[in-house]
Amino acid sequence: MPLRNRVTPFGELIADPARGLVYGNRGCLHDDAGRIRRRFDGRRWIACRLRFRGWHRSPMMQPGRFTELFFLDEATALAAGHRPCALCRRQDYVRFVEMWRDLHPGPSGADEIDARLHAERIDPTTRAQRHHEERFESLPDGAMVIDDGAAFVVADDSLQRWTPAGYEGARSRPRTGLATVITPPSLVEILRHGWHPVVPLLHPSAGGTAHVPLR
Amino acid sequence: MPPAMPLILLPPSEGKASGGHGPPWAPGSMAIDLDNGRERVLRALATAMRRPEAERGRLLGVKGEALAGATTANRDVREAPTMPAIERYTGVLYDAIDPRAMSATHRRRLDASVVIVSGLWGLVTPRDPIPHYKLKMGVRLGRLGRLSTWWRTDLSLRLAEVSSGRATWNLLPNEHAVAWRAPDGVHQWSVRFLEPGRDGSLTAVSHRNKLLKGALVRFLVENPAAGPDELAGWEHPMGFRYDPSRDAEHEGITMLTFVSTD
């Protein structure tokens, strides 16, 4: 029975047997019996490597410890509003902070970044995930958009439908018009500046050249 | 642009001031968010303080009146008044840092530089309000097991963020140093002090070690951009001098050696 710890681009937690390529957490979301009780715990939402120094967390969902989450790929983690971990993805984190500093002059410590991202990903009134609009033609690879209620990733000239197991059902990216974008605005800017993380940006099922193998 | 403040990692002290005038500890009151972990340790500590005297004594490493006092402090830890950590910790290291004698500028630098690695609180900054308590990082606390192991992932994640872009001075004893792991590529500096033994060979200073480190912290606060080059020209007030020829590197930590000039 799979645990309810797979994250969709909408930030929801689902139980699905498919494996993800990116790991992460947003605090302790489960109770002592391992049941998911909350969507997030704090503002530190991070995305990690699957493997790091041989560290193992077993069993998963230990009482009081952070809930282990899994994402299909980096594009999914970014859409859900997670940023790279400063520990296991040090180089990504340092580059992320440098890019962030260009986008948002001023203090750029983890707390400031997380506060800004939290405001971009969660509506404080409804506590629902926030979306915004951008022109289709301006969106970078890896950005996620909504169409017919489903999530699609932008990959070259196509939009590919997200599923827990990979991407399917490619359609042409519209050349004009407004897209409803799931990925928070600051993270879209990071993608636009050329984001090449150490974890796969896109699951191999997306095809093309935008995915990078695990190192 | 001013230089980034160094990150100076220190252990807490066994010696602590009693009392305080701040409100009781509450989640959200400390600069580095580790409140989930703190709540778990506080609950485990409360359970441990209900155990028989012999068990409490083994956990806290004291007997008699000292054990009674430590037990009371730990039982009251959620209701007791608080004071800034830099005032709470009164051991030799903190006496030598002597923050009260610092200028306002140096005090602000101290506050921005020092992070204390604690068995109960995880990470503590100098202005964080904490109550009186007694709990070592190296102990096994009920179901949590050894605290240094229990904290390791959380402390490593938080310190990875806190250390970004800063020189890291790891002045932790081993009991606390094992409670975190630095990210790849982050270089740390540590120090040791050597003095001539009875046979004339250089041996590590033990009893004055904290005193010597306290003076180094003062120097780093006064010279936030200091690295080994600046240390080479520094006369330690207790008669030690940095000897670059004895630098030793191990797993990303450069051990800088100070040798007695007496």
Image (cartoon, coloured by chain):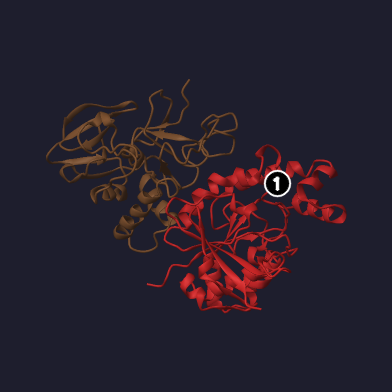
Q: Amino acid at mark 1?
A: Val
Towards the viewer: B61 or A18:
B61
Residue farthest left in this picture: A175
Q: Mark 1 = which residue?
A: B139
A180 sits left or right of B256 in the view = left
Quarter where residue A127 is shown: top left
Structural crowding at the residue carrying mark 1, measured as other residues with C-alpha within 10 Å and reported as few (<14), some (14–19) or many (≥20): some
Expressed as whole percent of the image width and height from the top left, the position of residue B141 reads 70, 42
Towards the viewer: B237 or A9:
B237
B179 sits left or right of A85 in the view = right
Expressed as whole percent of the image width and height from the top left, the position of residue A103 reads 29, 58
Q: Chain of mark 1?
A: B
A19 sits left or right of A155 in the view = right
Q: Which chain is brown?
A: A
Quarter where residue B17 is shown: bottom right
Chain B, chosen colour in render: red
Instruction: Give the tally of numbered discs.
Output: 1
Judge whether residue A126 can be spotted in this image.
no
Q: Residue at x 59, y 29 (%)?
A: A33
Helix, strand or loop at disc 1?
A: loop
